[in-house]
Image (cartoon, rainbow, N blue to C red):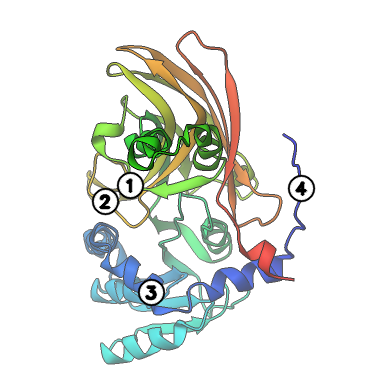
């Protein structure tokens, strides 16, 4: 994979500062807490695990406003260490006091890699997931906390993550491309020659975070990776990959793929599990889906096989930013590949 113009890699301290500063504003916390699927699933999972939490010590990694820490205290935790690296920790302290939880919830300003706790913990809870699961995620921090602070036999909430992919047909893209053929009829100027330029601009190599409707999904999604939070290592996160195979529902033009994730909460004393899903077949979350647009569409009919391999890895510019390399074959067409990333304004604007 070649790079036409290689950007300078941000040093880790600047990467971390940019990342933590992005959580200092109220908007992102409003968006996360207003995401009912996200917040209520965590609350339900914590309450379902109350037997494992009652009287125990909990570590909340990346606590933000402290809502998960308070849920743990409500579930009976003896002590909750709410570790938060950005200035929103000041608001978390206010919220904890406002809810009369300051005797059990202690907010600690700092990264989990650098703070020192006075004791080991029985439970780790964290909402660490980013777009496409791993973009700007805190999973490495959760693994650090696991290895350093979790007692043997302790529990992690959530305990498993899975990644899925499915071919899609995004009609909005096709409408935008067709637009240039309609200009002459409206204004007497033929601008159809813009269509190739428009295709390059729209169907580029960006990971587009967008809502995919059920009608646009062209097959059953295929799981291509699973992460067990009790055993996965930071080194393994440098290349998360897997193969996939999907059979098309019917006739359509594949112009992209969508990637989404689920995380699973185990209930150690109960047989059931609780799943937080970002699937287009489930209620929408603030994560939406990650869309990967192909350079050109490919026609499929019922049962056309769509196969390939996905590899997710940190970008060269920032370890916190994810790249997705996709190799795919649609029907009898030859195998193709494309590499995607989420645009990073910070590495251009920061000197």
- Residues marked 4 and 1 touching at CB (< 8 Å): no
- Residue identified by numbered label 3: 27
Residue at disc 3, secondary structure? helix
For the residue carrying disc 3, how many other residues have a C-alpha within 10 Å: few (<14), some (14-19), or many (20+)?
Answer: few
Q: Position of residue 28 (x, y in %)?
A: 40, 70
Sequence-first tag of 2 and 4: 4
- Residues marked 3 and 1 touching at CB (< 8 Å): no
Distance between the alpha carbons at the discs numbered 3 and 4 = 33 Å
- Residue identified by numbered label 2: 284
- Residues marked 2 and 4 touching at CB (< 8 Å): no
Q: Which mark is residue 5?
A: 4
**From the viewer's perspective, is the residue at label 2 or at label 4 nearer?**
4
Sequence-first tag of 1 and 2: 1
Residue lying at 71% horizontally and 50% vertically, measured from the top left: 316
- Residue identified by numbered label 1: 211
Extreme front residue here? 188
Residue 113 visible here: no
Q: Position of residue 145 (x, y in %)?
A: 54, 64
Distance between the alpha carbons at the discs numbered 4 and 1 = 31 Å
Residue 35 visible here: yes
Residue at disc 4, secondary structure? loop
Q: Name above or below for residue 309 compared with residue 280.
A: above
- Residues marked 1 and 2 touching at CB (< 8 Å): yes
Residue lying at 25% horizontally and 36% vertically, measured from the top left: 214
Q: State the residue in front, 90 or 248.
A: 248
Sequence-first tag of 4 and 1: 4
Quadrant of the snapshot with the N terminus: top right
Q: Residue 113's quadrant in the figure?
A: bottom right
- Residues marked 2 and 3 touching at CB (< 8 Å): no
């Amino acid at each position: 994979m070649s790079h036409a113009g290689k950007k300078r890699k941000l040093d880790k301290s600047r990467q971390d500062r940019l990342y933590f500063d992005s959580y200092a504003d109220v908007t992102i916390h409003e968006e996360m807490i207003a995401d009912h699927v996200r917040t209520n699933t965590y609350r339900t999972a914590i309450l379902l695990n109350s037997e494992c939490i009652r009287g125990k010590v909990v570590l909340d990694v990346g606590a933000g406003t402290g809502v998960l820490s308070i849920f743990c205290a409500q579930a009976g935790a003896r002590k909750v260490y709410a570790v938060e690296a950005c200035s929103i920790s000041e608001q978390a302290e206010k919220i904890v006091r406002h809810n009369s939880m300051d005797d059990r919830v202690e907010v600690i300003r700092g990264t989990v890699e650098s703070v020192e706790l006075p004791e080991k913990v029985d439970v780790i809870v964290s909402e660490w997931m980013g777009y496409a699961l791993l973009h700007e995620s805190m999973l490495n921090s959760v693994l650090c906390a696991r290895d350093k602070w979790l007692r043997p036999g302790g529990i992690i909430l959530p305990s498993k993550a899975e990644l899925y992919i499915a071919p899609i047909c995004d009609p909005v893209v096709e409408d935008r491309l067709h637009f240039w053929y309609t200009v002459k009829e409206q204004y007497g100027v033929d601008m159809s020659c813009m269509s190739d330029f428009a295709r390059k601009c729209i169907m580029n190599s960006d990971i587009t975070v967008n809502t995919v409707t059920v009608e646009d999904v062209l097959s059953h999604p295929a799981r291509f990776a699973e992460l067990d939070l009790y055993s996965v290592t930071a080194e393994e996160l440098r290349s998360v990959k897997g193969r996939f195979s999907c059979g098309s529902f019917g006739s359509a033009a594949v112009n992209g793929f969508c990637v989404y994730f689920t995380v699973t909460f185990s209930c150690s004393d109960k047989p059931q599990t609780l799943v937080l899903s970002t699937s287009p077949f489930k209620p929408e979350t603030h994560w939406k889906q990650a869309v990967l647009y192909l350079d050109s569409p490919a026609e499929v009919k019922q049962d056309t096989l769509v196969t390939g391999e996905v590899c997710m890895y940190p970008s060269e510019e920032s370890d916190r930013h994810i790249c997705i390399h996709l190799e795919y074959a649609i029907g009898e067409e030859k195998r193709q590949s494309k590499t995607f990333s989420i645009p990073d304004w910070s590495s251009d604007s920061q000197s």
